[in-house]
Amino acid sequence: MLPNKEFFEGVALKKCVTATYNKMRVTLAPHILYTRHDEMHVDAVTVEREGQPPRELKLGTFKLSGLKDVVVEERHFEPSDLFDAEAEKYQGTTLMTVEA
C-alpha cells in the first residue's frame, strides 16, 4: 500500500514526514500532492537526510511509491518560499496543497 494517508496528513497539518528513500532516512516537509503519469508524487523540502540538515534547502519531487516506512512527525513546518502552487506542472493534477 502507498503512504498516501500520511502525506495527506502532513500537507494538511503542515507536519514533517519521515520516510526511507533510496535506502536513506529522510525528513520531508510535504508541500503538495499531485499526479504525473498516473502516479502520485509529493513535492517536499528535505529537512534532514540521515539525521543531518541538507547543505541547501530545495524543493524535491518524490514518487510516493518510492517512499517506505512513512511516519508523520509532531514537528511542524512553515511553507517554503521555494514552493509555487501556481507552477505549470501542478495545473490540473493537484490533489492537495499546503495552505500558506
Image (tube, helix red, strand yellow):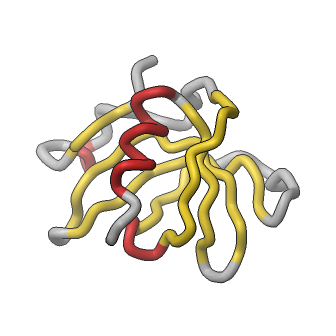
Q: Residue furthest right?
A: 52
Q: Which residue is at 52% across, 29% downward?
A: 14
Vertical relation: 1 (above or below) 16: below
Q: Residue furthest top?
A: 100
Q: Position of residue 13 (x, y in %)?
A: 47, 27
Q: Looking at the rendering, in which quadrant would you find the C terminus? A: top left
Vertical relation: 64 (above or below) 22: above
Q: Position of residue 64 (x, y in %)?
A: 39, 65
Left or right: residue 85 versus residue 49 is left
Q: Quadrant of residue 19?
A: bottom right
Vertical relation: 12 (above or below) 53: above
Q: Which residue is at 56% across, 45% downward?
A: 72
Q: Position of residue 77 (x, y in %)?
A: 63, 29
Q: Position of residue 75 (x, y in %)?
A: 69, 33
Q: Quadrant of residue 86?
A: top left
Q: How many numbered discs, if any?
A: 0
Q: Which residue is at 77% across, 50% downward?
A: 56
Q: Which residue is at 55% across, 27% downward?
A: 79
Left or right: residue 62 versus residue 48 is left
Q: Looking at the rendering, in which quadrant would you find the N terminus? A: bottom left
44 or 82, nearer to the observer: 44
Q: Residue furthest left?
A: 92
69 or 34, nearer to the observer: 69
58 or 8, nearer to the observer: 8
Vertical relation: 76 (above or below) 42: above
